[in-house]
Image: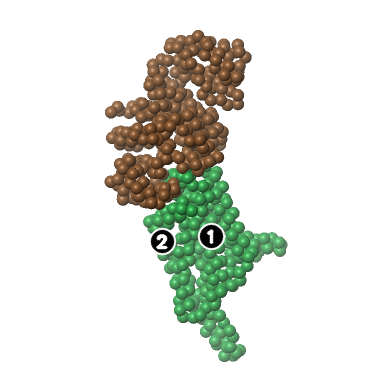
């Protein structure tokens, strides 16, 4: 449903994300996990078409974000990190405005507003002024806004931030119920959140993807599996097959390429350091080695930076 | 089209929910009434004088209603200089400050639709302001029979002038998150476009003088006030408006790049 390829965003002073690639399948909930400032919001803003990328492509349901921005935006409901609320409006008035700019047919607007308010459990504050609502309600009004028009893709930037534990639970249940009919990408810096809601996790740190896996596998990795990231210049298929044939290597995936340099994710047998063997193989074959990194190590670093303190229900 | 209307409607609601609309309307109506009264008094005095002169020099034709409307509608351009920045200051700056710009720019709307929606919201409020000036003008029609031609051209001139000011203010409100800064910058910019007229009077070379006079936002209003309809003036205001709208459009694009 969403294909992100080699996405790079450079700002005047810093590169926010570099060669980010991942895919989201239809009906899946993908968690975007990373410490603050890792590039989660930037990636989401590019997917929603708020911001153009410096390099790379994003396709949503087959449409390119840069070439067919309107087609893409029609398919996306987006909740930015700060819910985009017009504080002086009532909840209903606000949702009606959103329905109009999203092109919901006139005769369906009232029904649609009713539907999303029930979904986000905000029916009881329908006629209140948004400015007077509590933070939890405001967040849910923002969520209701994203649901208007029933878009197949939902991009939610930190949807549970600032909510109390009961509201967090409600929002997570709501997101889980959305899966299947909707493809959801949500970002968070809270580790247990992805374990509870997401089918798959992309871990991003300082603008680069460091791991893509299911929450279960990530947990398993933390317990000692070996994974190595390599950036190699050379023919990708040959590299993959040769590395795969090496002793101690379980699997090799390509996770992106840039200027003829390919990034690989190599799974190794437990408690076996294959890094020097890999380096030797690259040199012997005459490829160029640009990066070699043991991910298990850096994953631990990243996980340490993440908030893990959240109480379990 | 429906999208643009939705933006206009929301913006107008926002004007009338906040005190801005009422303050602007009150001040505008009060000031225009005050100016009308003083211009009326002046013209009446001139009429009295000319009557005295007529006893010695013989009767002379004098278009008193015309003088009143011309004077009154010319002063409107001064009041608008102060009022317009208040109408446009929040159009984009507030959206930037609150983050709602992210909603507009990720909705299935083109940037042009967003810019036009905002622009016409300002224009609609401006039309309401212009409408209030029909209170004093209406009294003129009630008690005298002014020539309608010059009044219509004067209104057309004010309308074009107002559209240009709104477009300039709209562009400036994309540059900042702060309404006050947007208002002051708009006011300053419009003031500079006014003052080139003064500079023109002091210019040495005739070409320099001609160029500066052409650039002055106010020199082009004179002919409209006199009842003269000239394409060059219409083109001036329209191009000023289009340039400012284009800059607004580009500014939104650059906002996207910078995030």
Viewed as shown, does residue A186 lie left or right of A262? left
Specify the farthest residue to the top.
Answer: A247
Q: Residue at left 50%, top 43%?
A: A70
Mark 1, residues whose alpha carbon is within 10 Å: few (<14), some, or many (≥20)? Answer: many
Residue at 44% across, 39% down: A76
Q: Position of residue A306 (x, y in %)?
A: 39, 27
Q: Position of residue A296 (x, y in %)?
A: 44, 18
User: Residue at coordinates 60% horizontally, 63% vertically from top-left?
Assistant: B234
> Residue B110 has which mark?
none
Q: Which chain is tinted green?
A: B
Left or right: residue B21 compared with residue B226: left
Residue occupied by mark 2: B23
Instruction: Please give the letter of the chain rendered in brown.
Output: A
- Mark yes or no: residue A13 visible: no
Choose between B132 and A257: the one closer to the eye: A257
Q: Nearer the viewer, residue A165 or B182?
A: A165
Disc 2, disc 1: CB below 8 Å? no
Mark nearer the viewer, 2 or 1: 1
Q: Is residue B133 above or below residue B63?
A: above
Give the Cα separation between the discs numbered 2 and 1.
21 Å
Mark 1: which secondary structure?
helix
Percent across and percent down for residue A121 are 30, 41
Tell me the residue at 43%/11% (across/down): A271
Residue pointed to by mark 1: B163
Q: Quadrant of residue A83?
A: top left
Circle nearer the N terminus (2, 1): 2
Around disc 2, counting alpha carbons within 10 Å, would you say few (fewer than 14), some (14 to 19), or many (20 or more)?
few
């Amino acid at each position: 449903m969403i294909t992100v390829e080699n996405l790079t965003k450079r700002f005047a002073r810093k590169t926010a994300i570099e060669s980010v690639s991942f895919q989201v399948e239809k009906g899946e909930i993908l968690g975007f996990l990373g410490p603050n400032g890792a590039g989660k919001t930037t990636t989401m803003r590019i997917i929603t078409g708020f911001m153009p990328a410096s390099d790379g492509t994003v396709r949503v349901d087959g449409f390119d974000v840069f070439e067919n921005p309107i087609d893409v935006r029609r398919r996306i409901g987006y909740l930015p990190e700060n819910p985009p609320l017009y504080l002086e409006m009532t909840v209903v008035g606000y949702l009606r405005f959103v329905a109009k700019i999203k092109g919901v047919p006139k005769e369906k607007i009232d029904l649609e507003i009713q539907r999303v308010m029930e979904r986000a459990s905000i029916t009881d504050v329908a006629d209140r002024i948004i400015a007077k609502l509590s933070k939890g309600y405001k967040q849910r009004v923002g969520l209701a806004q994203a649901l208007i028009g029933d878009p197949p893709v939902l991009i939610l930037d930190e949807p549970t931030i600032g909510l109390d534990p009961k509201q967090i639970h409600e929002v997570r249940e709501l997101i889980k119920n959305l899966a299947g009919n909707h493809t959801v990408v949500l970002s968070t810096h809270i580790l247990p959140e992805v374990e509870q809601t997401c089918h798959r996790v992309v871990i991003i740190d300082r603008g680069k993807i460091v791991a893509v896996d299911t929450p279960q596998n990530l947990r398993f990795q933390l317990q000692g599996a070996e994974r190595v990231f390599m950036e190699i210049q050379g023919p990708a298929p040959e590299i993959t097959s040769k590395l795969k044939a090496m002793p101690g290597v379980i699997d090799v995936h390509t996770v992106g390429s840039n200027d003829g340099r390919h990034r690989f994710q190599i799974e190794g047998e437990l408690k076996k350091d294959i890094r020097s063997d890999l380096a030797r193989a690259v040199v012997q074959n005459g490829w160029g080695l640009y990066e070699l990194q043991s991910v298990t190590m850096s994953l631990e670093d990243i996980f340490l930076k993440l908030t893990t303190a959240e109480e379990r229900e | 089209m429906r999208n643009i209307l939705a933006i206009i409607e929301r913006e107008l609601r926002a004007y009338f929910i906040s005190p801005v609309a009422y303050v602007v309307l009150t001040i505008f109506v009060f000031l225009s009434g005050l100016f009308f009264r003083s211009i009326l008094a002046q013209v009446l005095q001139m009429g009295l004088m000319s009557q005295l002169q007529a006893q010695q020099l013989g009767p002379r034709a004098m278009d008193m209603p015309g003088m009143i409307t011309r004077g009154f509608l010319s002063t409107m351009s001064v009041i608008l200089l102060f009022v317009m920045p208040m109408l446009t200051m929040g159009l984009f700056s507030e959206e930037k400050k609150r983050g709602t710009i992210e909603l507009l720019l990720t909705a299935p709307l083109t940037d042009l639709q967003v810019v036009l929606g905002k622009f016409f919201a300002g224009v609609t409020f401006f039309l309401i302001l212009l409408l209030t000036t029909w209170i004093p003008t209406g009294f003129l029609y009630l008690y005298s029979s002014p020539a309608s031609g010059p009044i219509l051209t004067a209104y057309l001139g004010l309308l074009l002038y107002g559209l240009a000011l709104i477009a300039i203010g709209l562009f400036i409100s994309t540059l900042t998150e702060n309404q006050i800064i947007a208002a002051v910058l708009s006011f300053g910019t419009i003031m500079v476009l006014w003052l080139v007229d003064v500079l023109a009077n002091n210019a040495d070379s005739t070409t320099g003088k001609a160029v500066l006079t052409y650039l002055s936002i106010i020199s082009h209003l004179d002919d409209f006030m006199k009842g003269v309809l000239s394409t060059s003036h219409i083109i001036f205001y329209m191009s000023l408006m289009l340039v400012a709208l284009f800059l607004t459009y580009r500014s939104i694009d650059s906002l996207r790049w910078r995030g």
